[in-house]
Amino acid sequence: MKKYFPAIILFSLLICAVPALSKSTPVQSIQDSLSALENSKKSILAGNDKEKADAIILKHRAILKKIFDTIKSEQQLHADQFSRVDSIKHLEDKIHIHEMREESAAINHDKIKLATDRIHDRIWSFLSFLVNARNTYVCQEQILNNIEGQRQWLKKINVPANPDSASDRELNNSLLNYKSVADTFSTILKYTQDNIDGLATTSWTHYFNIKTLLKSINTSSDQIKNINNLMTPVNLSVGKMVLAALVFLLCLLLSLFLKKMENRVEEYIISNDRSFERNHIFFKKIHKPSKHIVFFFISHMIFLVLFFDTPFEKYINIACYTVYSALFLYLISNVIDVMAIMHIDRLDRSDKGLREEFINLTIRAVKVIALIAVVITGLDQYGIKVTTILSTLGIGGLAVALAAKDSLANFFGGLVILMDDVYRQGDWIEAGDVDGTVVELGVRSTTVRSFSNALITVPNSSIAGQHVINWSRREVGRRIKIIIGVGCDSDMADMKNAIEDIRCLLKVHPGIAQPADGAQCENPKMAKLLTHTDLKGVKNSQMVYFDSFGNYTFNILVYCFTKTTDWNEWLNIKQDLLYKINDVVGENNLTMPYPTQVVLKQEIEAAGGGGE
């Protein structure tokens, strides 16, 4: 079964890839619709279409609606593949040669083809204009002016009259094509004019009639006109600067109002003792991203007024959309954390462990979904279609994936290490036979400097698939474990006193971790989701007990942790502790014997001649 597994995967991916690859692009969809409309017009002109007029009108409207629905969903229209520029230049050269030879029939034929190609190019140019106009907030008046200009251009085209001769059948066909294309363009222009409200979009500034305000300010006096002439190269004017100042003042008043409301809310939180802690956490989590959003909103409004009705307006809106997305994602992330903190007290005590894990998983899942949604909408804003990207990941992507299987495994292994925050640069880790300090987490591998000063390179997939001990992830506590052996002839009262003295020694020693060390948590509520001592690595246990009977000693266990996690400091503290324990043992009349062996020799007197 295993040998057929790659073939099964390949077949499945082919099935998934065929629908995506067969799906036409938006530009191709528009071209197909234009061809269908031209063919319908040609059939009507040739007298071959016997459908009723109502049916033909409905068919044309459906085709036009499909074209304009595609236009509304696009950020840019790349129609280079349908450009007739090369064909137009070729026909112009041919007409020049025919004119030199005085070949009138060939001249008429090529002129009709030339006019047809020029209309084709004009149609695509007009459709591209509509896409750009929609995305750059061009007003309806400018679109209508463009439509009128296209109609005037169409009227100026002159083509030879249709000769009424059977020998000019090819010329008749060319003229029929020209008429169908010209009528198609006229139909598109009329449909655009009739549906201008559903096509044109407006920025927020247009709703306030900013253009009228700017015009009234800029034309109020000759001095202002002169100043505007000087600022024309930088796309600025007195009117824009005045309106930007007004917007700044309004936003400043808004920020002062919000600041006052913020103070009122904080006073209310302080006065409400019952829910002070919970409300204060909520306020602090929401306050910072909200402040950033308000500040950026003020900046956005000022720049939008300054660059109103310029080519930069589009790019400002796109850039601001990216920043707004990041800020709102930051706000959403904080809101999710706050909601988890505020509802953690309602956990079911009987199923506490499961519920805590479920909440942690849910928080991460919601954040990832929010991030993916922001990224997808951001890519769409920049004109990058996610569906197009996914459709390209077909057979070619499969071949690359199979060839780079190990590299991809290492890459995703690195992502797993990053997302789980297994280790960082500078951490002391132990993974299998690898023991040392992390130098770098790369795309393919992790480099570790061993304690013998050797550089070890380990594939990320290898580390991601095994257990990793991270010795650097501890905030307080490096373990000291000592077994003290005292003589078997020791008095138990002296042993009890020695044990109590060692306990007192640990409590007062400046280098030994105490129960209060590291117990503080910045967010007490969050501690219910993740135990602070386990998350940060806080160990402060102190244990001194009569542990066991040895072969020749009574064993006392001393178990504690140092405040520091540094190895050199740990050794100094351990050394000092050993000295002081030795003093305590001597003060309590105890000895630490060394291993001895007693040999008992029994002499046997041979009674009556013992032995042979």
Image (tube, grey):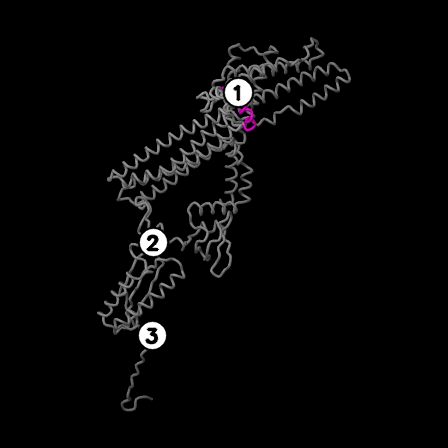
Q: Give the side of residue 539 with respect to residue 120, left or right.
A: left
> Could you say which is closer to the camera, residue 291 or residue 557?
291
Residue furthest bottom as drawn: 608
Question: Which is in the foreground here, disc 1 or disc 3?
Answer: 1
Question: What kind of residue is marked 1?
Answer: Asp
Q: Residue at x 28, y 61 (%)?
A: 508
Does 412 appear above or below 388? below
Question: Which is in the foreground here, disc 3 or disc 2?
Answer: 2
Residue furthest front as drawn: 223
Residue 210 is situated, as x and y percent measured from the top left of the image, at 46, 22
The secondary structure that most of the magenta stretch takes on is helix
Give the crowd class for mark 1: few <14, some 14-19, many >=20 residues within 10 Å: few
SS for dot 3: loop
- Mark number displayed over residue 222: 1
Mark 1 near mark 3, Cβ–Cβ under 8 Å? Answer: no
Q: Quadrant of the C terminus?
A: bottom left
Does 292 appear above or below 409? above
**What residue is disc 3 on?**
595
- Mark number displayed over residue 538: 2
Residue 230 is situated, as x and y percent measured from the top left of the image, at 56, 26
Question: What kind of residue is marked 2?
Answer: Val
Q: Quadrant of residue 483?
A: bottom left
Q: Quadrant of residue 171?
A: top right
Q: Residue at x 55, y 40 (%)?
A: 399
Q: Give the side of residue 503 with respect to residue 237, left or right.
A: left
Indicate which disc, 2 or 1, sits on the residue closer to the N terminus: 1
Q: Give the side of residue 277 with respect to residue 454, left or right.
A: left
Indicate which disc, 1 or 3, sits on the residue closer to the N terminus: 1
Q: Is residue 605 visible?
A: yes
Residue interval drawn in magenta: 219-234
